[in-house]
Structure formats: structure tokens, C-alpha cells
Image (spheres, grey):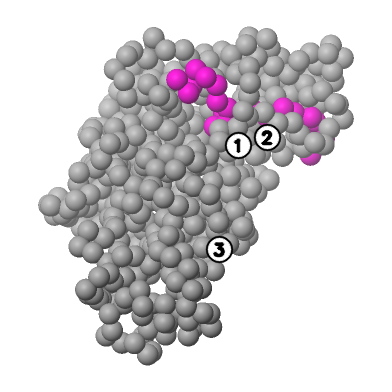
């Protein structure tokens, strides 16, 4: 996806940025250029799709070698610039680096000089070699709507209000009676003041929208009777509704046909949540306006869309698809819950937050802790458990007990780079990103490189490495020994300095852990 800034001194942008939505460094770069009234062309890598990448998506689970398929835009850009991280900034056809390099140019007074020089030479923002691997027909990565049907949310909301009124009337005047079609029609007639013909039509609408269900032993996932009933012909029940401050997609079933494949549902949700995140990200990229995000119509649409998760089938997912699915859903759930109920304000509330907030997925409840430690860490012990906090992890129970149906979806083996992909809403967390099965490897590699670039620091005397506490809490996911942990980190980095120090003096480096900034990334 390509767009251009509106405020500019030049009609033809001489600056181009490859970005990703929700990236604070990308937002920082765009804010700087806008403040300087410098026109730029933005190419969002998470929206940029071409036929090569679509083909790659279709072949993700095939056994054909990666090299036998055409490269996508991300891979080609990485090969050209040697950088995985975003933004990647081009001025007059030359890649000058990322946000930090752009700031340095501005501080030295060289930024506008480069732009003026490019303008005088009529230099294009991107070199021909880069333009060549961009899709000829650039397009937005559309939300996949197969199976969604026509969405009439206005009418659905109206029908939900009817449901509440009918249930109140039943609880008041018809306790213990069988919920037959005749009884439902009678209650609708009285409560809504309509005739029998209109009452029957409304009942059919309630059934079509899955607000009212036919009661049977094979009823849909999540449906149980709050007005239990049997009848000689047919009887009805209402779907289960979970507490709205705990199960954030538990207020209704998906009303628009059978749910789509899990990966498609997650893709739709991740695009919606990233659009929201990008829209309410501060100019410096360091905070999100969760209050106004939660009040927006786009957020209401996102909340309604999460209902589709309740009945998705996780069984067909490959390992790569499971990682991408659950990373995206975890990140979306954190944003959803933070906007809906606010962020935790202390350590105790923070521990409760990640164990309490949930989505219903495929008929089972998953908290953030369940997703992180149960699914993505192969049913490991949470470092926030009581025993783990006092150094007795060996006594702690695994996340899922034996026989738990969610065990069927745990990821083996663990990819420790998921810790660079999961976003907890704190300022020390990595930025939110897009992940799919087709770009999982390059996505996690890019996340690891970007995280280590900002969170791993070597002291001036080259004796101490300061690490994020993520490496302390989850060190065993990366390596069992200190030197192996550092080697793993060095492998994630683009530079060679840490690797060379480990080769020359593997046991000489000390490790220090930086304080984790648990302040909420909220305005």
C-alpha cells in the first residue's frame, strides 16, 4: 500500500518510507517529516501485497523449498538494504537508514539539504531496483470476507435489545414454562406491542441471527439454556453470555453464517486492531489513546467481529499457523481489554489482568496467560505464578492440567522469539506487528533484530551486557547457560561486536538486567 503525505513543499515526493502500522519508530519518522513540511511516499509493508506473496501464502504448508518460490517485497527489500527493521527511509533514491538516522540528519541541518538536492536533480524517491520488486498493481490487503455474508449490524443490535426485553418478561411472568414458538411469540407480542404475524417474523429473525437457538443435545458451541425447556415439537434456548469484563467476545454468537477458517478470522481481526492502533498512536509513537480508541465506531465494529472466534476450528492449523494465530489474538486481546476496562495499575492487578482477560476461541476460554504459557511456550509454568516468584518453579503446575482440551494446540518446539512479538501494553514491550504463516520467519527475525537493537546494550568498557528483563524471566526458553543466551542474542543482531567479544572471551562478559518499564503506553 502506497500513500503520500498531504503537507509538502513539493508536489513530487523525493522521500519514501517503508513502514509498518503500529510501529512507534515509523510514526516518529513520519511526524518529523510532516513537521518539516517534507513530502513523502509511504509504503506500508504489512499492507503491500503482490502475486508472489499471495502464491507464497497459498504454499506456506507445502514441503517445497523456500528458495524455489519468488521472493516477496519484504525479502527483496531486506536483500537490497541489509535491514529487516522499519522504517526504511529513502531520500533521492538513497537509503539513509531508519528513524534514528533521520533524526540525526535533521539535528545536523542536513535533512532539508538532501531533499533540496534531490529536488534539483529531479531524483526519484526510490531507486529503479526497488521499484522493480514492488507489485505492479499496488493494493490494500483487503479483509477477507468469504463466508461473512451481508452484515446488518444495526438490525442485529436492535434484535439484541429485543432479546433482553424478552428475557426480562420471561423471568417475571413465565418462570418454569417451556420456551416454545408459541410462548416466544406471545411474549414478543406483549413486550413489543406487535401482532402475531410480526411476532413470528421477529422470532425468525432472532433465530437467523443466532440470538435465539433451537434447543437440542447437539446445540452450537457456547449455547446452554438459561430457560431450560422440552417440548413435544421444538423448544428454544438463549446462548451463554459470559461476564463482559472477563470474556471480551462472550456476549453473542457470530450471526453471519458458519465461521471462516481460523487463520482468516485472525487475519481480519489483526488488520482491524492494527488500523485502530495506528489511528490512535501518538505523534512520537510512544503512547496510544486507549480512551478515544475505545469510544470509536471502528472499535465497536472490532468488538462485534470477535464473536466469530467462538466457533472457529483450530484443528487444521499447522505449527506456523498456530504461532501466527495466537500471537495476533494475544496482541488484539490486550488492546481490546485495555480499551474496554483500562490497564492494570500495580503488580498485583497486572498479574490478575493477564490471567483474567479472555477470548472464547473454538468453544474454550483462553486468557493471555493461557495463550503465552500454555500454547506458545508448550504448556510451561508462568513466571508470574506464586512458586515461580519465590524461585520454586519446579513446584509450580503447568498452565494446562492433564486432560485439558487446549493441550491439543500447544506449539512444539517453542520459538523463543515469540517474546519479541507479544505486546503487553507496557512501554518496555515491543511494538505491535502483523504475523501470518507465510511471513512468520521473517516477521519473528525482524522482531528479534529490532528488539535486540533497542534493548541490548554493551558497556563502554565492553565488559557488561545490559539486557531486557524478558531475557531473565524467559531465559530458559532461549538457552540454559549464560554464554549460550548471549550467543543466541548475538545471532539476532545485525552487528558483529557482541559475537566477536564472545569468540574472544566467552566467559568474561557480565550480564545486567535493565528495569522493565511497566508504565502503560497510554496517553
Q: Residue at x 55, y 56 (%)?
A: 152
Which one is in front, 470 or 291?
Answer: 291
Q: Is residue 63 above or below residue 278?
A: above
Q: Are marks 2 and 1 in contact (CB under 8 Å)?
A: yes
x, y percent for residue 59: 37, 21
The magenta-colored residue range is: 35-55
**Was residue 39 drawn as part of the magenta stretch in this picture?**
yes
x, y percent for residue 32: 73, 37
List the residue tagged with mark 1. 25
Could you tell me how far apart the alpha carbons at marks 2 and 1 are, in whole angstroms? 6 Å
Residue 452 in sight from this viewpoint: no
Q: Earlier in the sequence, mark 3 or mark 1?
A: 1
Q: Is residue 265 above or below residue 189?
A: above
List the residue tagged with mark 2. 29
Q: Nearer the viewer, mark 3 or mark 1?
A: 3
Which one is in front, 491 or 189?
Answer: 189
Disc number for residue 45: none
Q: Earlier in the sequence, mark 2 or mark 3?
A: 2
Q: Residue at x 23, y 33 (%)?
A: 413
List the residue tagged with mark 3. 155
Quadrant (top left/top right/bottom left/bottom right) for the C terminus: bottom right
Quadrant (top left/top right/bottom left/bottom right) for the N terminus: top right
Amino acid at each position: 500500500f502506497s500513500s503520500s503525505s498531504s503537507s509538502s513543499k513539493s508536489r513530487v515526493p523525493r522521500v519514501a518510507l517503508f513502514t509498518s502500522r503500529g510501529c512507534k519508530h515509523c510514526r516518529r519518522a513520519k511526524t518529523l517529516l510532516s513537521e518539516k513540511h517534507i513530502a513523502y511516499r509511504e509504503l506500508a509493508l504489512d499492507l503491500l501485497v503482490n502475486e508472489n506473496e499471495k502464491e507464497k501464502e497459498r504454499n506456506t504448508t507445502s514441503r517445497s523449498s523456500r528458495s524455489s518460490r519468488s521472493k516477496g517485497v519484504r525479502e527483496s527489500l531486506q536483500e537490497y538494504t541489509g535491514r529487516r527493521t522499519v522504517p526504511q527511509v529513502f531520500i533521492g533514491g538513497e537509503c539513509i537508514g531508519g528513524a534514528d538516522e533521520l533524526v540525526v540528519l535533521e539535528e545536523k541541518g542536513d535533512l532539508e539539504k538532501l531533499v533540496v538536492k534531490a529536488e534539483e536533480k529531479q531524483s526519484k524517491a526510490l531507486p529503479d531496483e526497488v521499484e522493480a520488486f514492488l507489485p505492479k498493481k499496488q493494493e490494500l490487503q483487503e479483509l477477507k470476507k468469504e463466508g461473512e455474508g451481508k452484515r446488518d449490524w444495526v438490525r442485529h443490535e436492535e434484535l439484541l435489545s429485543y432479546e433482553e426485553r424478552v428475557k426480562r418478561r420471561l423471568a417475571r411472568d413465565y418462570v418454569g414454562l417451556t420456551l416454545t414458538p408459541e410462548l416466544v411469540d406471545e411474549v414478543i407480542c406483549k413486550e413489543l406491542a406487535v401482532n402475531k404475524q410480526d411476532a413470528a417474523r421477529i422470532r425468525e429473525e432472532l433465530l437467523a441471527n443466532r440470538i435465539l437457538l433451537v434447543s437440542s443435545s447437539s446445540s452450537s458451541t457456547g449455547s446452554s439454556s438459561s430457560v431450560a425447556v422440552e417440548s413435544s415439537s421444538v423448544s428454544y434456548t438463549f446462548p451463554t453470555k459470559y461476564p463482559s469484563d472477563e470474556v471480551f467476545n462472550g456476549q453473542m454468537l457470530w450471526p453471519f453464517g458458519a465461521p471462516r477458517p481460523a487463520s482468516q478470522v485472525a487475519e481480519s481481526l489483526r488488520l482491524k486492531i492494527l488500523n485502530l492502533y495506528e489511528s490512535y498512536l501518538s505523534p512520537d509513537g510512544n503512547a496510544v489513546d486507549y480512551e478515544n480508541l475505545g469510544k470509536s465506531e471502528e472499535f465497536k465494529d472490532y468488538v462485534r467481529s470477535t464473536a466469530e472466534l467462538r466457533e472457529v476450528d483450530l484443528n487444521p492449523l499447522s505449527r506456523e499457523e498456530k504461532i501466527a494465530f495466537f500471537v495476533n489474538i494475544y496482541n488484539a486481546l490486550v488492546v481490546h481489554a485495555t480499551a474496554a476496562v483500562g490497564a492494570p495499575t500495580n503488580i498485583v492487578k497486572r498479574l490478575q489482568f493477564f490471567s483474567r482477560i479472555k477470548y472464547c476461541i473454538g468453544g474454550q476460554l483462553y486468557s493471555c496467560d493461557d495463550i503465552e504459557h500454555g500454547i506458545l511456550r508448550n504448556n510451561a509454568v508462568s513466571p508470574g505464578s506464586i512458586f515461580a516468584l519465590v524461585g520454586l518453579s519446579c513446584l509450580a503446575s503447568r498452565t494446562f492440567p492433564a486432560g485439558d482440551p487446549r493441550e491439543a494446540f500447544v506449539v512444539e518446539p517453542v520459538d523463543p522469539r515469540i517474546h519479541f512479538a507479544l505486546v503487553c501494553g507496557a512501554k518496555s514491550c515491543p511494538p505491535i506487528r502483523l504475523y501470518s504463516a507465510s511471513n512468520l520467519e521473517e516477521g519473528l527475525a525482524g522482531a528479534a533484530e529490532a528488539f535486540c537493537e533497542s534493548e541490548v546494550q554493551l558497556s563502554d568498557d565492553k565488559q557488561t551486557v545490559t539486557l531486557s528483563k524478558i531475557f531473565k524471566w524467559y531465559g530458559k526458553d532461549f538457552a540454559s547457560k549464560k554464554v549460550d543466551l548471549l550467543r543466541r542474542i548475538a545471532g539476532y543482531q545485525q552487528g558483529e561486536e557482541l559475537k566477536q567479544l564472545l569468540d574472544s572471551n566467552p566467559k568474561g562478559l557480565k550480564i545486567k538486567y535493565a528495569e522493565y518499564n511497566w508504565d502503560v503506553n497510554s496517553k
